[in-house]
Image: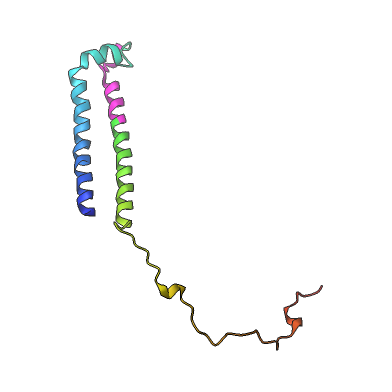
Amino acid sequence: MALRMTAFLLIPLILGVSLSRMVVFTGFQLNKNFIASKLCENRDKAWMHCEGKCYLAKKMKEVEEKERKQDRETQKHLVQDSFTPEMFFVFFGNKLTATFDTPYYGRISSGHHADLFQPPQV
C-alpha cells in the first residue's frame, strides 16, 4: 500500500518538474515581444540585448525554488510514511497489571542501624 502511494505521489511530481519548465519557456516565447517591451528590467539598456531574458531567468528561478520546496515536502512525507505503520496497536495485557507473589512481603527488617541513613556532619 505504501509503495502504491509513493508511486502515485512521485509520478505527477516527476512529470510536473519537466512540464513546469516547458510551460514557462513556452509562455516566454509566445509573449517575447510584450515581455521585452514591458516587463524586462533592462529594457532601457539596449546595448545589453536582454530582450526579456532577465524575466525568463527570474521565472525559471521561481520554478526551481518551487520544485525544491515540493521535493522537500515529498521527502518529508515519504520518510513519515516509511516509518509510520498503517495500523499501530498498543496492547497492554493483564500480565503488566497483575500482582506477583514475592518473598519480600512484610516489614523491612529493623536490623539496620539508624546511623547509616543520616547525612554526614561537617
Say which of 59 and 119 sits in front: 119
Give the quadrant of residue 23: top left
Say which of 102 and 112 sits in front: 102
- Residue 96 appears left or right of 102: left
Determine if the magenta segment contains residue 79: no
- Residue 119 appears left or right of 62: right
- Which residue extends farthest right? 122
Determine if the magenta segment contains residue 54: yes
Q: Position of residue 69 (x, y in %)?
A: 33, 38
Residue at the (20%, 26%) spot, across then down: 25
Residue at the (30%, 16%) spot, across then down: 40
Span colored in magenta: 46-62
Q: Position of residue 102 (x, y in %)?
A: 52, 85
Q: Position of residue 9 (x, y in %)?
A: 23, 44
Give the quadrant of residue 43: top left
103 to 25, vertically: above or below: below
Residue at the (33%, 10%) spot, across then down: 44
6 to 20, vertically: above or below: below
Residue at the (31%, 25%) spot, across then down: 58
Q: Position of residue 24 (x, y in %)?
A: 22, 26
28 to 68, vertically: above or below: above
* Quarter of the figure that contains the C terminus: bottom right
- Residue 97 appears left or right of 56: right
Count of marks placed on residues: 0
Main SS of the magenta part reads helix
